[in-house]
Amino acid sequence: MQIEDLRSLLTLGEHRHVTEAAVALGTSQPTLSRLLSRVEAELGTRLFERDAKGAHPNPLGDLVLDAARDIVDRHDRLRRDLAGLLDPDSGTVRLAFLDSMSTSLVPRILHDVRVRAPRMRVELRQEPGHEMLRDLATGVSELALIAGPPQGPYGWMALQRQSLVLIVPAGHRFAARRRARLADVAGEDFVTIPPGFGFRALIDDLFAKAGVTPRVTFQIGDLATVEGLVGAGLGVAIVPSQFAGASGTTGIPLVAEGAERVVGLTWRTDRALGPAAARFREFVEQAGPYD
């Protein structure tokens, strides 16, 4: 079996119909049928059950498809990694980032990198901070855009300081204020991120230092949705200033020590970055900061 044979099996497993899979592969139905028969003969077992509705993998077929998917993924990653070693500017970088950076910081960084290395490929993973650190540890990601320098064997490059503001819906009694204090939130319904997220830890720390306990009524793991809930009149929230106003909310600067979020690029320091990732980091350092 060749790698392309495994790709054909995966396509058949996706379409579950020989004719449709053949069209997707740009080949003929008899050619794909012969390939399937050859693979089954080589493995010594039937993998797909054929009937009037198509071709469906049996339990052994599912096992083979899982293995084929893993082999193809490993092969493709090897090719990309080799390409990155031979020519870093055309290699592949695996970058993770927080959801809250998806419409602001990430596009700006990718634009700046693309200008410097138009052939560089970037695989993006959008996930919470604790998942990013896990993926950095396992090597699934090489670089991550995260809030605050993580503890442990991590490098850190601060890229942007984001002021935190209190957002209120249109017509709210605080809307005309020039400044807000954390104590102002005490009597309001409060919308925020669930516990376990880095931004929630920042908010909880601010309230703890101020001796204030907010009345949390809604929790959602996406700052854009938090802003939308406030815009709908469901409470108030504290968010980075970049999110204020998207749904008609008003952002009021906070008078509180530490009322900011610092975001930056991080990577593991207990192993060397791949050439493409190192080049990506270099380009970001040249282009930044992004305040």
Image (cartoon, grey):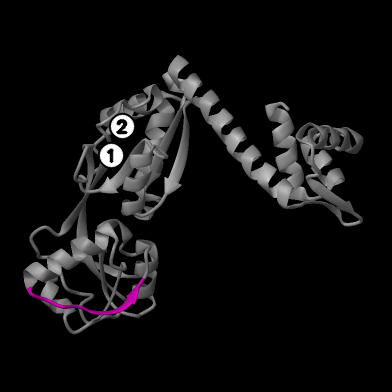
Is 245 drawn above or below residue 100 in the view shown? below
Q: Mark 2 is on which residue type? A: Val
Q: Which residues are magenta?
A: 211-219
Residue that appears at 60% across and 34% down: 71
Q: Which label lies toward us, 2 or 1? A: 1
* Residue 238 in the figure: left or right of residue 24: left
* Residue tagged 1: 265
Q: Where residue 148 sits in the image (x, y, percent)?
A: 21, 48
Q: Quadrant of residue 145?
A: top left
For residue 84, the mark is: none
Q: Where residue 163 sits in the image (x, y, percent)?
A: 19, 56
Q: Is residue 240 shown to the viewer in this render?
A: no
| Callout 2 secondary element | helix
Q: Where residue 219 sits in the image (x, y, percent)?
A: 34, 72
User: Is residue 216 highlighted in magenta?
Assistant: yes
Q: Residues within 10 Å of mark 2 (few under 14, many from 20)?
A: some
Is 58 drawn above or below residue 173 in the view shown? above
Q: Mark 1 is on which residue type? A: Leu
* Residue tagged 2: 284
| Callout 1 secondary element | strand
The foreground one among 63 and 178 is 63
Quadrant (top left, top right, bottom left, bottom right) of the C terminus: top left
Is 228 drawn above or below residue 134 in the view shown? below
Is 117 drawn above or below residue 34 in the view shown? above
Count the labels in the image: 2
The foreground one among 260 and 127 is 127
Quadrant (top left, top right, bottom left, bottom right) of the N terminus: top right
Residue that appears at 83% across and 39% down: 22
* Residue 180 in the figure: left or right of residue 136: left
Residue that appears at 27% across and 75% down: 236
* Residue at the front extreme, as displayed: 44
Q: Are marks 2 and 1 in contact (CB under 8 Å)?
A: yes
